[in-house]
């Protein structure tokens, strides 16, 4: 994925210097765009002052949003605050990046997309894996026809730890996988089914399996868990010509010359060698933050714009509805009312 750099150097404020916000502050500062840090917490401001002592730090966003020299805001605050902060920034004439999920509430997400359109502002959502060089390489392979028709994608995101008590594992882990699947399928699902298990905190699922069905017959499975004996982040994309696997732990991207032939009416597996595919070792967050800066400088649409974020959020809500209904099928009609039907058999 290429970036078009502009001579204009945008001035970006980062709202939130907590867990993930620290990484954004560090990266935007390294790239040379950081103009301010905002954090209402004393701890966040202390962290920022230690990390970027030469950058102005604020407790409230008001002064920063009122500053005409600030071009854009990157928001890395708790998800429940995203809507209010992003809305204020857009209304103040700033371009906005907001970490995933864009909002918790679907109607709020729709209103943010509409507001950004009405105000002529860029709205970008932080779906980091869509900027990962390996994911971009897989997308290139698909577009070049190397895999043939994509039939099936499975994504595992497993670990022991990163436990949450306020959000379940579906909302914590799966947005990454769903955004990548939508990107690689280049389509939205027609049906969503999710099941899971709750073992630690009542009402908070610790493991979920989400199934996505697409109109062309393709399928995808997303398995996420924070109760797993070892860490695994693996993506498998199966086409009718070849298959590709990516392990984020070993950083290996392998193109497998394997498919199924039909001989005398019977399916026969054809096994070939796997070939390692090279990809850039550039950090996804560096690419993502640079992309946002380029979008601000050039006033161009982001790769993961507000509508992208809205699609992912819609599917998360569909999956949660299915999970709450013990695995009932949710018919996914993005933008329309969704009907729930009972699983046959």
Image (spheres, rainbow, N blue to C red):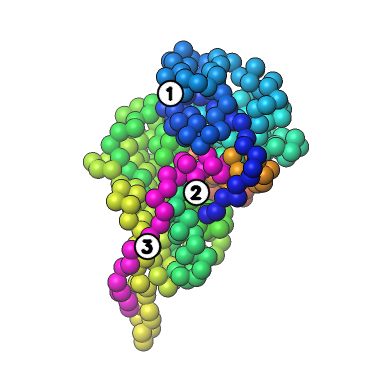
Quadrant assignment, res 110:
top right
Give the numbered dot on residue 51.
Answer: 1
Q: Earlier in the sequence, mark 1 or mark 3?
A: 1
Q: Position of residue 59 (x, y in %)?
A: 55, 14
At 62% from the left edge and 37% from the top edge, which residue is drawn?
9
Q: Earlier in the sequence, mark 2 or mark 1?
A: 1
Q: Is residue 263 visible?
A: yes
Q: Considering the numbered disc 1 on the image, is that residue within a helix, a strand or a loop?
A: helix
Residue extending furthest toward the bottom: 264
Give the numbered dot on residue 277.
Answer: 3
Residue extending furthest toward the right: 118
31 is higher (above) or lower (below) than 182: above
Q: Position of residue 243 (x, y in %)?
A: 39, 66
Q: Considering the numbered disc 3 on the image, is that residue within a helix, a strand or a loop?
A: loop
Q: Which residue is mark 2?
A: 130
Please report contact status of discs 2 and 3: CB closer than 8 Å, yes or no: no
State the extent of the magenta-drawn residues as a range.
Answer: 268-292
């Amino acid at each position: 994925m290429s970036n078009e750099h502009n001579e204009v150097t945008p001035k970006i404020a980062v709202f939130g210097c907590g867990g993930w916000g620290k990484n954004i502050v560090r990266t935007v500062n390294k790239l040379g765009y950081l103009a301010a840090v905002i954090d209402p917490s004393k701890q966040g401001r202390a962290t920022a002052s230690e990390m970027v002592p030469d950058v102005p730090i604020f407790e409230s966003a008001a002064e920063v949003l009122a500053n005409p020299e600030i071009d854009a805001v990157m928001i890395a605050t708790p998800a429940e605050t995203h809507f209010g902060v992003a809305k204020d920034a857009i209304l103040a004439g700033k371009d906005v990046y907001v970490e995933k999920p864009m909002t918790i509430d679907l109607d709020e997400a729709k209103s943010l997309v509409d507001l950004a359109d009405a105000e002529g502002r860029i709205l970008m959502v932080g779906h980091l894996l869509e900027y990962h060089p390996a994911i971009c390489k897989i997308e290139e392979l698909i577009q070049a026809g190397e895999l043939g028709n994509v039939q099936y994608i499975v994504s595992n995101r497993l670990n022991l730890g990163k436990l949450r008590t306020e959000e379940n594992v579906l909302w914590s882990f799966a947005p990454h996988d769903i955004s990548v699947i939508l990107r690689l399928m280049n389509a939205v699902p027609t049906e969503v089914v999710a099941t899971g298990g709750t073992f630690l905190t009542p009402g908070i699922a610790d493991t979920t399996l989400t199934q996505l069905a697409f109109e062309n017959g393709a399928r995808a499975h997303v398995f996420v868990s924070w109760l797993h004996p070892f860490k695994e982040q693996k993506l498998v994309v199966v086409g009718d010509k070849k298959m590709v696997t990516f392990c984020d732990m070993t950083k290996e991207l392998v193109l497998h010359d394997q498919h199924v032939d039909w001989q005398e009416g019977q399916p026969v597996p054809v096994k070939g060698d796997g070939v390692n595919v090279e990809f850039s070792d550039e950090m996804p967050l560096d690419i993502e933050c640079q992309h946002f800066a380029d979008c601000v400088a050039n006033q161009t649409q982001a790769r993961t714009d507000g509508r992208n974020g809205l699609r992912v959020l819609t599917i998360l809500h569909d999956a949660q509805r299915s999970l709450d209904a013990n695995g009932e099928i949710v018919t996914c009609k993005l933008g329309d009312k969704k009907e729930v039907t009972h699983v046959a058999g």
